[in-house]
Image (cartoon, helix red, strand yellow):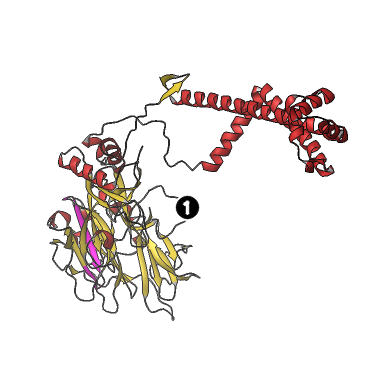
Amino acid sequence: MRAKAEVTDVSARRRGIIVTELPFNVGPEKVIARIKELISDKKLQGVSDVRDYSDRKVGLRLVIECKTGFNPHAVLDDLYRLTPLEEGFSVNNVALVDNQPLTLGLRELCHHYLTHRLEVTRRRTEYRKRKAEARAHIVEGLVVALGDIDRVVALIKSSKDSATARAKLMKEFTLSEIQAEAILEMTLRRLTSLEVGKLKDELKELKKIIADLTKLLASDKELRTLVSSELAAVSDAHGTPRRTKLLEGIPASSQDAASLEIADDPCVLGINAAGQITKFDAALKGKATKSDLVISHVASSARATVAVLTNLGRIVRVPVLELPSKPVKISDIADIPASERAVALCPIGEEWLLALGTRDGVVKRVTMSSLPTKSNVTTGISLREGDEVVGAGAMPASGAEDSELVFVTADARLLRFPADAVRPQGASAGGMAGVKVADGHAIAFAVVNPATAASSELITVSDAGSVKRSPLSEYPSKGRGTGGVRCHAFRKNEQALVVSTIGVGIVALSSTGASVDLPDISPRRDASGVQLEAVPVRFVVARG
């Protein structure tokens, strides 16, 4: 017998096993004690904690938390093998067969029980037939006597005792001794016409019963059909649904530490348009939604650690193994406020640099290997009051001089400048001037690598809902700290840009999350936008 267990997320960062049913005569305290003993003896790996949440309201609920990096399904196999979550029961089926004690298997038990039921049913039928025949014999005698009752009464009155009367009745009417005795014991009320009719009906019914019982005894098929229907009736009246699940049989397998650990397989992480971190499938197809569109993504592996940059300039180290299978907010896996949101992802290592831009136009490059390792949450940039990160991107440390950084401001200015114009700084530094924001603030920042520079596009959305789409190559490179060039010509009813995105394969979403068709590419970098019916609120550069 096996416990009923399910592998699931037991917290925002942990996978585990939830047990809701245990084998008969096994309590949760017995399982917990055995698990702790195995952990102490180093015979069980992959379990970090076990807790009992059972109560009268939820019933049995045993939560077994798995260590990071271990496969919960493999851990469950070990638990079945080593703990009372799986118990075996032996049954010694000794029964008397023809007065001989024999050890029987399940098939033999069923065979002998069925043979017994057939024999019981046959003897019961023979007994009922005998009882019916005996009663029919008596009723036949009573019917004969009532048919000539005056003669019967005269014969009895002329006899000196009951023995003489019985002998005369047997001789005169050709009756048996049993029939004659029944006539002598008959009460006077049986002489009514109603009672005579009842006796005739009873005799008719008895003959029918005798015929049916005779037919049943003569046919083995009829007898087996009767036994089958009776057993089915017993099952319907007293049967209950099976509580234990029958399995074909699972061979015991010994799991070692290597098979328990999750393989370091490659994966892709992304921050979707809803601000959640998720592992996504690069082959995703179908209609775009906020959950499957990513504003930042990075290639990684199952046992790696990545850095997540928040809008308040903090960098959070996140082990990929601790990320659940479903999208999760950064506040659910790190000790930061729920209002703080993820902006970008970056690999951790000497070969990577992180570039970021803020609302006040500050730019900074951070060498990922320079980040402190004592804490999972560290400062990525020291922000001035009211400032926040509007965008970020990763670039390889070797060849970073070939990359470019791009700012877009609310007053429709775009500044594009070489990445090597910004020297790498420490984690606590405040950055340097990126773009001049005299009449507004920065609304977007992006890192453009040489491989995608020629195919990158710029999307801008005004506060009136007009959208402009243009090639990034139309905008010349300028010096860091300048105001850049105009990228969107405002109309009379437009005051500022509210959304902007730079990248390849851009997709737009409306305020309801529906896809929005973008306008054709405008060859003029300072042209006005095209008015759309639905106002996009989020643009992403790649689909997960």
Q: Position of residue 493 (x, y in %)?
A: 44, 80
Residue in front for this viewpoint, 221 or 13 = 221
**65 in magenta:** no
Closer to us: 514 or 364: 514
Which of the pair 161/324 is nearer the observer?
Answer: 161
Q: Is residue 212 visible?
A: no
Q: Which residues are magenta?
A: 349-362
Q: Quadrant of the N terminus?
A: top left
Task: Give the number of callouts.
Answer: 1
Residue 165 is left or right of residue 118, and the answer is: right
Q: On screen, 411 above or below 288?
A: below
- Determine which residue is flagged by label 1: 286
Image coords of residue 175 (percent x, y): 79, 25
Q: Secondary structure at mark 1?
A: loop
The answer to which quarter of the image holds residue 27 is top left
The residue at the far bottom in this view is 492
165 left or right of 6 in image: right
Q: Residue at x 55, y 28 (%)?
A: 117
Position of 110 with respect to 332 (left or right) is right
Residue at x 42%, y 38% (from the top left corner): 245
Q: Is residue 148 above or below residue 405?
A: above
Asked if 535 appears above or below 48 in the picture, the reply is: below
* Residue type, mark 1 in image: Gly
Number of residues whose C-alpha sits closer than 10 Å to that of mark 1, classed few (under 14), some (14–19) or many (20 or more): few
